Image (tube, rainbow, N blue to C red):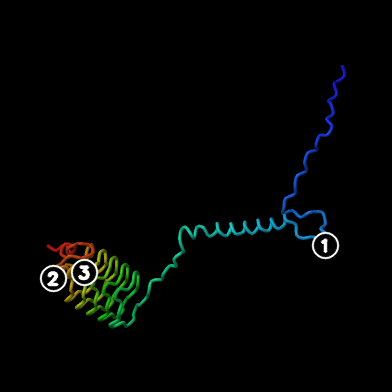
Amino acid sequence: MPPTALPRVDGARPSPMPRPHPCTPSSTPARPDARPHRSLRDCWRALRRGLLLILLLAGLPALLIGPAQPAQAAMDYAKQVLIGHDFAGSDLRGATFNLTNLREADFHGADLRGASLFGAKLQDANLSGTDLTDATLDSAVLDGTDLRNAVLENAFAFNTRFSNVLIEGADFTNVPFRNDVLKSLCASASGRNPVTGRQTSDTLECP
């Protein structure tokens, strides 16, 4: 038996041709007097929006994290003569004062955490209320120096010369001293540090 022929459906619409991408140039030449095609204008707008989005996404981490802070180089005052210089209230973290003449200098309330004052001359200097945590004071000369209410926690001062220093309220937690220096400091230890709340005599572990 011969196969049955499929009926022909008249009026069937052919499959629609795919529309060209709006950013694809047309193969049909444009008339000289023709105005720019709308699809091309839309294409340029889309490109501009895309570029703007890329720029915004590229800058998003900076907006979320905040502007990068440039690393501040530690100040170097080594081997200078700074007699009577005013450093009161200054941010001197990590600064270097090795072998510097700081006689009668004013450091009241300055931040000297991690600073190096190796061999510095600090006669009659005002170091009251300073933060000398982790500072290096080895071989420095402190004669008549004001250390009242200063914080010297973890400072290195084993060979530091202390003479007639004012230490009321100073915090010497974890600072190593020679026995003769420790005995001299304990003889005048008094007060409580206003920042750490520790008694000076306790931080020196005076007997």
Of the residues shown, which amino acid type is indicated by label 1?
Pro
Q: Disc 2 marks which residue?
A: 188
Q: Residue at x 87, y 16 (%)?
A: 1
Query: In this picture, is 87 found above or below 52?
Result: below
Query: In this picture, is 104 found above or below 71?
Result: below
Q: Is residue 16 left or right of residue 86?
A: right
Which mark lies nearer to you, 3 or 1?
1
Quadrant housing residue 164 = bottom left
User: Which sits earlier in the primary sequence, circle 2 or circle 3?
Assistant: 3
Query: In this picture, is 4 found above or below 98?
Result: above
Q: Disc 1 marks which residue?
A: 32
Within 10 Å of disc 3 (Cα), the crowding (few <14, some 14-19, many 20+) is many
Q: Nearer the viewer, residue 139 or 206?
A: 206
Within 10 Å of disc 2 (Cα), the crowding (few <14, some 14-19, many 20+) is some
Q: Is residue 51 left or right of residue 29?
A: left
Q: Residue at x 32, y 73 (%)?
A: 90
Label 1 element class: loop
